[in-house]
Amino acid sequence: MPAGELRHPTPPLGSEEEEKWLWEQIKAEARRDAEAEPALASYLYSTILAHSSLERSLSFHLGNKLCSSTLLSTLLYDIFLNVFSTDAAIRSATVADLRAARVRDPACISFSHCLLNFKGFLACQAHRVAHKLWTQCRKPLALALQSRISDVFAVDIHPAARIGKGVLFDHATGVVVGETAVIGNNVSILHHVTLGGTGKSGGDRHPKIGDGVLIGAGATILGNVVIGEGAKIGSGAVVLMDVPPRTTAVGIPARLVGGKEQPKVHEEIPGESMDHTSYISDWSDYII
């Protein structure tokens, strides 16, 4: 846990009590920051302290972030709030995403900091709403949201893409996720990652990312390939084939650390440990 560890025991993960506990934490952090920095007091009050729940605060914040002269913040607020307030699974995923950022990213100094300022988190929550709209056959509205998310956050996720919970988009700039991509639970993805197709053919054509995967900055994964549970994709890698669970793929084109026949297998979950450099000496003789 980063600096400023929580003083009180947390309730069970995924429970309603956890959501309430987290909201109380966020409000306490906002009050503390408003006292410490009066210049932010009005902003913190309007985005957090004036609201009765996490879903209302998040809906208000996203509405203001994603609005335009023709797509009003009040309309977006109603759309976001309707989805968040009626879908417990999405609210649970939001809580898990907040906790993922707080635990995995040492630059995340508080839950409220993530809620207000982490564009990877905000883009992911807006996508969850766009995906819900897509499944309700409200595709024009879902695509309009996708466009605004891309314009504002520089994160382009097709509304049909499926994303699990406890997902961290770290920095997030330049992330592209295609229509038929699937991202599992407890995955961490850094900036400029592409989960793309291989041409203009339709159908199931995008990567499937297993639980606990870590994808380093600038990695490109193309086609309907499977990245196994707990695998690690090195920064800048170009992956065109399946990657077995708990192995590491690096390079262009990507190859398995330890070789195809007997790849090195790690025990930790890299999507949670954020360990980018294990086994570097096993595949590279680069020396500074």
Image (cartoon, rainbow, N blue to C red):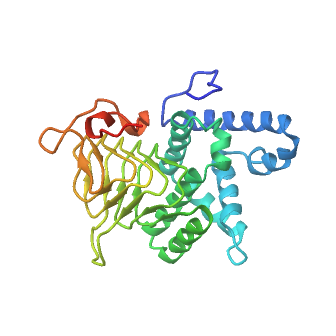
Residue 163 lies left or right of residue 74; in this view the side is left
* Frontmost residue, 211 versus 11: 211
- Residue 86 visible, this orientation: no
Q: Residue at x 22, y 57 (%)?
A: 241
Q: Residue at x 39, y 66 (%)?
A: 178
Answer with the quarter of the image where residue 28 lies: top right
- Position in image of residue 66 (x %, y %): 65, 65
- Position in image of residue 187 (x %, y %): 41, 45
Q: Residue at x 79, y 33 (%)?
A: 32
- Position in image of residue 93 (x %, y %): 49, 46
Answer with the quarter of the image where residue 202 lies: bottom left
* Frontmost residue, 65 versus 11: 65
- Residue 45 visible, this orientation: yes
Asked if residue 75 is positioned above or below residue 281 in the image, the reply reads below
Asked if residue 104 is positioned above or below residue 207 in the image, the reply reads above
Asked if residue 144 is positioned above or below residue 230 in the image, the reply reads below
Residue 91 lies left or right of residue 210; in this view the side is right
Residue 283 lies left or right of residue 132; in this view the side is left
Answer with the quarter of the image where residue 226 lies: bottom left
Q: Residue lying farthest left?
A: 261
* Frontmost residue, 105 versus 30: 105
Screen quadrant of the C terminus: top left
Screen quadrant of the N terminus: top right
Q: Residue at x 65, y 58 (%)?
A: 62
- Position in image of residue 78 (x %, y %): 66, 64
* Frontmost residue, 194 versus 183: 194
Asked if residue 53 is positioned above or below residue 287 in the image, the reply reads below
